[in-house]
Image (spheres, grey):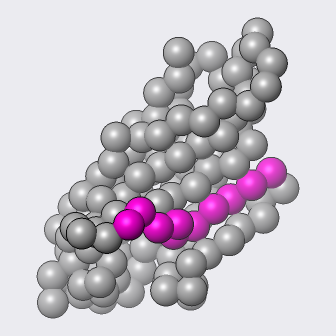
């Protein structure tokens, strides 16, 4: 079994910062990619940032220069540092991981439960 647990969400004023964490646990051999998505009320889920093997990163245009994705391979944990937050960043943020499991072939996909980020104006 594999679980992804997000933490770090909360309420912050515009211009503030938050750091989200996504801890993966279970029989994990390696994490190929970790992606943060967000979904605001009445909106579709959208990609925020992605980090893949070799630490290549991809960002949505709306967060470039403000958000930074990173990961600690030894801890199987990913992070999303969010600075200069805006009210339009308010959403539930979800972590997604594509990983290889011990004793199993192939690549598996897992989602976290989501964490609420609310930015007040």
Using the rendered image of the protein, determine whether residue 104 is visible from the camera's viewpoint: yes
Residue 98: x and y in percent read 66, 40
Residue 51 lies in magenta, yes or no?
A: yes
Q: Quadrant of residue 57?
A: bottom right
Q: Is residue 52 above or below residue 106?
A: below
Residue 70: x and y in percent read 62, 59
The boundaries of the magenta stretch are 44-53
- For the view shown, which residue lies furthest in the right direction? 54
Residue 28: x and y in percent read 66, 23
Question: Count of labels shown?
Answer: 0
Residue placed most toward the observer, 18 or 40: 40
Using the rendered image of the protein, determine whether residue 75 is visible from the camera's viewpoint: no
Which secondary structure class fits the magenta region best?
strand
Residue at 47% from the left image edge and 60% from the top image edge: 37
Q: Is residue 107 above or below residue 15?
A: above
Residue at 58% from the left image edge and 55% from the top image edge: 35
Residue at 53% from the left image edge and 66% from the top image edge: 47
Residue at 47% from the left image edge and 49% from the top image edge: 95
- For the view shown, which residue lies furthest in the top direction? 103
Residue 39 lies in magenta, yes or no?
A: no
92 left or right, relative to 105: left
Pick the quarter of the image with the C terminus. Answer: bottom left
Residue 67: x and y in percent read 51, 76
Q: Is residue 77 above or below residue 58?
A: above
98 left or right, relative to 55: left
């Amino acid at each position: 079994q594999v679980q992804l647990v997000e933490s770090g969400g909360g309420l912050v004023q515009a211009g503030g910062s938050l750091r989200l964490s996504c801890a993966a646990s279970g029989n994990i051999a390696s994490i190929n990619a970790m992606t943060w998505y967000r979904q605001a009320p009445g909106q579709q889920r959208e990609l925020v940032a992605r980090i893949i093997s070799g630490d290549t990163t991809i960002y949505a245009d709306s967060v470039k220069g403000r958000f930074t994705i990173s990961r600690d391979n030894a801890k199987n944990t990913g992070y999303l540092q969010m600075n200069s937050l805006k009210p339009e960043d308010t959403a539930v943020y979800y972590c997604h991981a594509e990983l290889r499991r011990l004793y199993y072939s192939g690549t598996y996909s897992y989602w976290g439960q989501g964490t609420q980020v609310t930015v007040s104006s």
